Image (spheres, helix red, strand yellow):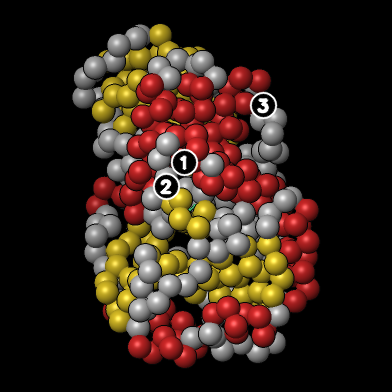
Amino acid sequence: MVMARNFDVIIIGAGSTGSTAAYYLAREGFRVLVVDSRGVAQGMTAYSLGLVRSYYTNEDVARMAHYSHEFFMNFGKEFGVEVFTKTGLLVISSNEANMRAVYGMLRRIGARVRLLSSDEIRDLLNAEVSGEFGIYEEDAGYADTGLYTNTVMKRAMELGAEFVLDEARVLIDGYEARGIELMRSHNVLRANYYVLATGVWTPKVLPQLSLPIRNIIERIVRVDTGRSLPNVFDYVNNFYIRPEGSSNALMGLLYPPEDVWQDPDTFNPLAPPPLEYSLDVMERAAKRFRWFEGARLMGGWQGLYDVTPDWMPIIDEPIKKLILCVGLSGHGFKLAPAFALMITEMIKYGEPRTFRNIFTMSRFREGRLIKGIEEKAAF
Ligand SMILES: Cc1cc2nc3c(=O)[nH]c(=O)nc-3n(C[C@H](O)[C@H](O)[C@H](O)COP(=O)(O)OP(=O)(O)OC[C@H]3O[C@@H](n4cnc5c(N)ncnc54)[C@H](O)[C@@H]3O)c2cc1C
């Protein structure tokens, strides 16, 4: 039941984005209501790999990732609950000049990274390496996405935020958001600001804006490797590995095929990836690790990414009082604390102060897509 009728901010969506924003806003004394039709961490947050790292090849995004990374590393101290597992991350590429440039940028922003030679990669991974370079980020790891999201939401509620299980429709009058309608309880609620954190449902929630968001399938392959590993991003063979416990790994393609599944309500996340997809991912890993031939396929699952033209988020207020934090393109979990800070500053000061907002929608119209050092999306 909704206790108060006057809110400063109503957030739609209680995934990692909306829940973290609720915590940040409640911490600043804002009266916050979060509405979700499924519950806390029941959207794509539930199917995420939860990789957390500072490594990005675009400096603005790397600064946000680094800030968020520290939030995850200090989470236990702040919340009394450990959600983060440190594993390290090794990024492998054959482009020495780019690796040196990324390394220099990451050092400048304070990330603990080392540049590795082929020999050092071979020693670290027991891998086949020749003429390639690595960046090793010691503090990278992964977090339990469900536990994280429920913990920040619980703290937001202890700070006064309210949560209601309902489906929301945004009421827009001309160029201004005027309220939300709760479709199940037939309530209309109003606030000074509305935040949309609806992930892959956004095109359904706001069809009138024709946002450039396609929902793309991301398939996760689960493998028994029989050994523990750091996270590995292999740009030469186009695959990644994220360890799961001490003997399993979760894997996929760094650049997946862009298979669109626009309607999340007809999507089954529990379906395992097609066999040929899983074998393709495993064969790529076997080129890097000879020992991988002994790895066993254990199934997997799939999720949807809400992807924009440059595979980077949209953070904007296209309609007065309506802030969007959507189109997160597979980056959303690890950046949630930075997004939450940005949203809070937009509401408190009228603009973000800590980070540059490079995520406004005008970039698509003006052809200023966000790039990384490799000219591709800033992964
Ligand atoms: C397979 C996979 C792996 C990933 N791996 C990583 C990773 O390793 N690292 C990383 O940083 N990111 C990763 N991501 C991306 C990241 O998990 C997502 O970007 C992030 O979790 C999305 O969170 P969200 O809160 O924006 O959306 P969601 O978690 O999808 O939450 C949106 C919520 O909005 C609610 N909602 C929608 N419409 C309405 C409505 N009308 N009324 C009320 N509620 C509504 C939904 O019920 C849902 O709970 C991955 C994603 C996938 C799919």
**Amino acid residing under circle 3:** Glu
Q: Which residue is mark 2?
A: 83
Label 3 CB, ligand 1: below 8 Å?
A: no
* Residue in the image at 73% along x and 63% along y: 102
**Which SS class for mark 1?**
helix
Q: Are marks 2 and 1 in contact (CB under 8 Å)?
A: yes
Q: Around disc 2, counting alpha carbons within 10 Å, would you say few (fewer than 14), some (14 to 19), or many (20 or more)?
A: many
Q: CA distance from mark 2 to mark 1?
A: 7 Å
Query: Which quadrant of the view contains residue 246?
Result: bottom left
Q: Which residue is mark 1?
A: 76
**Amino acid residing under circle 2:** Val
Q: CA distance from mark 3 to mark 1?
A: 30 Å
Question: Going from the N terminus, do you reach mark 3 or mark 1 first?
Answer: 1
Closer to the camera: disc 2 or disc 3?
Answer: 2
Q: Nearer the viewer, residue 156 or 275?
A: 156
Label 2 CB, ligand 1: below 8 Å?
A: no
**Amino acid residing under circle 1:** Gly
Looking at the picture, does residue 39 appear above or below residue 107?
A: above
Q: Position of residue 273 (x, y in %)?
A: 30, 70
Q: CA distance from mark 2 to mark 3?
A: 31 Å
The quarter of the rendered structure image containing the N terminus is top left
Q: Is residue 361 visible?
A: no
Q: Position of residue 341 (x, y in %)?
A: 58, 32
The quarter of the rendered structure image containing the C terminus is bottom right
- In the drawing, what numbered circle is on residue 266? none
Q: Around disc 3, counting alpha carbons within 10 Å, would you say few (fewer than 14), some (14 to 19), or many (20 or more)?
A: some
Q: Which residue is mark 3?
A: 351
Q: Nearer the viewer, residue 235 or 193?
A: 235
**Which SS class for mark 2?**
loop
Q: Is residue 52 visible?
A: yes
